[in-house]
Image (spheres, rainbow, N blue to C red):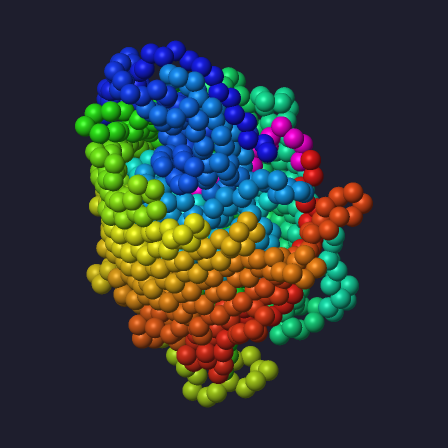
Amino acid sequence: MFAYIAVMKTKTIKSRPSRFVIVAGAFLAALFLVPLGTEARPQNASYDLHGQVIDENGQPVSRVQVNRRSATEITQTIYTDAAGTFELRSLSESQVHLSLSKPGFFRIEDREIDLAPGSNEVTLTLNHETELQEKVEVESEPVQIDPDTTSHQESLVQHEILNVPVPSSHDLSQYLATMPQVVADVNGRVHVAGARQSQIEVLLDGFEINDPVTGNYTSRIDVDAVRSVTINTGGYGAQYAHASAGILELNTQTGDDKWRFGATNFVPDVSFQQGVHLGNWYPRAAVSGPIRRGKAWISDALSLQHNFVLLKELPSGQNIDTQWAGDNLFRAQVNLSSRNILQGSFLVNRWTDAHQGLGVFSPVSTTNNYRSQRYFVSLMDQIWIGRTLFEVGAAFDTGSDKSNPQGTLPYILTPSGTSGNYFQTFTEQSRRLQFVGNVTSGALDLLGQHTLSAGWNVDGVDFSQQAARGEIDFQRADTSLSDRAIFTNRNGTSGPAVLDLANTQLGGYAQDLWRPWKPVIFSVGVRTDWDRVIHENVFQPRIAMNWVPADDGRMKFTLAWGKHYQSLNLAVLGQAYDQLRTDQFFSAPSQPCIPSVPCPTPAPLGSPVVTAFFAPLNELQQPRSYNTTAEWQERFFKSTFFGVSYLLRESRDGFAWETQPAAGGTLVLHNNRQDRYVAGEAWLRHSFGENAQLEVDYTRSQASSNEVLDPSLGVLILARQQPGPLPWDTPDRVVSSGWTPIPIWGLLLSGFFEYHTGFPFSILNEQQQLVGAPNRIRFPNYLSLNLGLEKRFRFQGHEWAVRVTGVNITGHKNPNSVVNNIDAPNYLTYAGGQQRAFTLRLRLVTQH
């Protein structure tokens, strides 16, 4: 076993941390300067145990479940604090048996510790779960009912990511979509708890990694580098700055005292469709180890992606798209001392796609040559003084996107598809510099037990864009011209439009986790946020309560409410400084056009319609949301967990472009959008021994808005804002995953099942006008079953694992594109989606 324990006899003077003085306006310095006090210990107490839990890198591990057992049953359950410490006081026996557990870590089972009279200290090492060639460690439970955690939380740990069969095992977003509160829309973009992507704060090892401009999750990370993924969708604390709807936390590998190397799918795939091509190939490799044992470690995870896309519906030679992408995450940790840990990371993303947008209804001439790159670097210093944790960190990321069409011909939109060349050329650059600081105390006694925390954040964001747009011709089914759109700058010129935007965001918080008596815990926090564009402070109270009636913590009931700030989306605001669009509509021809003969340009229908976007910054408010959560969860027997939850999120003062009757074609940015998400969830999880697990989850939900439409210069739906379901609304959704060894050749059987109501979409006519209510028709209901069989074997002195996955083995039709033009002859024709397929994953199991 890797667990290490050190026990030593210390002074018998009994002391406990005294009360600390909090200066809430400063959020930082001098929070915990009051000296320690003393407290008389009961005369009948013979043994005290002061413990700390650290990981393999010497970093304290918080929220570890520590069970003290007697000869027959658990007699006490406690959890480590932010410094990884715990205390057992007034013990009557000279020997204790401890079991430690936390998801994502190997468990320590029934460890025997001998105590001397008086005060004793113990240090225990809890190792992160890593894939081992020979099974020694005991994996963690899939769920932990933590009495101090008030958020509705779902997580994936490393062995779950390895086991769940998804169509593309290199794509982290596909693993995210296996989680009950995460839905991937028809474009593959993930939405957490029915929210827009910009409403979710994505954290990479404690730093925000959302796109600085749009707020979307666009970064790519090697899945083999991910230790755990945690999603919080309600009841979370005030420490999260830009999370109006939830938090997605990604925690990655650091390395330990053993050199480890792993590789996956390093053998190239060859496609023989319409010739010989390099097929889909997703090699990745990871290496980690010590620079200095016990002091400094590094890890590096590299992933390459080659996507080969062939569309049989398009002509040969014009139906292939190849995409190259790469990402590399380098991490390092140095223990400057046992109580001062410095960590840093460097992430690189690159992507090229010569024919971006190729589809069944979009031929190769209408695609773009697209390139993007992004660099992210971070540094975090953690210092423990006593039982108080101080954190100070900084991160910088920068990225660029470039897109060029295949030519300069007009872009033609017909009811059945597109032709010509795409209309837009653009270059975008973004930058963000962020600083964070946090301080968290150990347990303090004053009318119960308190854990205090406070912190601040500063973000600077810059966005620049240069865009040039050509002509768009909208044609009827007979190829006659219905509408012609051209773009000009606001000063009347036709050259590229250039814009530069910047914003500064400031925030701070204070929070108290208070246990007035053992069964009840209150989490009370407040934060405030301000930005330079809107010039408004948003005051955000948050309160939550846990009731844990059983002494062993097997049952918990949670109520929570909070007000949450949403950071400004510069991409939306940027349209107010972009080009103007002019649409000239034309009457239908007096006689039908003749096929293969150019149709003459018909007579103009009225005056041109000029569309401009305008943002009155002095009238805008900061968007915010109000989240209410109720949850009950319980553990039955040893490893069966059941829970039900209710989530209501009301997003108010959201930004949306609205048509103004007195302003012609001007679209004005207002704060009238109100999104609403309500969901009821029931779930069951059970572990069948060490290597078998089953999870089933059902969610009934509704994601809607009073202003559904998101007009832009390129996609301009001519209609007023209207209410309706959001495009990723799924009223009914069932997900289930699990795996188990089977008594056939030592195979591991794994599966993932998903069913949900089809996504909604809108109907347009040939003049891009909305027909009926928005999002009133839905795709067919989605159903998919993936099954995987994995075999581990030894070859050439190494251990390997090969898995064959059957994707959508039922062959259910799950289209992701549709002809939604009511004037098209093939109106409501569905296409695309994942067909039945089989994939192969070959892994060199981590060597050390």
Q: Position of residue 10 (x, y in %)?
A: 42, 13
Residue 766, by quadrant, is bottom left
| 257 magenta-colored | yes
Side of 232 where 840 appears, left or right? right
In the image, taking residue 638 as reference, residue 410 lies left or right, namely: right
Instruction: Reply yes or no: does residue 404 show up in magenta.
Output: no
Give the magenta part as a residue range. Answer: 249-260
Image spot of residue 573 (x, y percent): 35, 47
Question: Looking at the picture, does residue 44 appear above or below residue 133?
Answer: above
Camera-nearest residue between 113 and 217: 113
Total number of numbered discs in the rendering: 0
Question: Where the N terminus falls, by quadrant?
Answer: top right
Residue 337 locus on image (x, y percent): 51, 17
Residue at left 31%, top 26%?
443
Going by the picture, which residue comes out furthest to the bottom?
591
Q: Is residue 654 visible?
A: no
Relative to 176, residue 585 above or below = below
* Foreground residue among 719 and 234: 234
Q: Which residue is the extreme one toward the left?
A: 447
Q: Is residue 795 above or below residue 787?
A: above
Q: Position of residue 288 (x, y in %)?
A: 64, 33
Tell me the quarter of the image containing the C terminus.
Answer: top right
Q: Is residue 658 above or below residue 520?
A: below
Taking the spot 55% from the left edge, 31% from the top edge, the residue there is 3
On the question of residue 478 being in view, the answer is yes
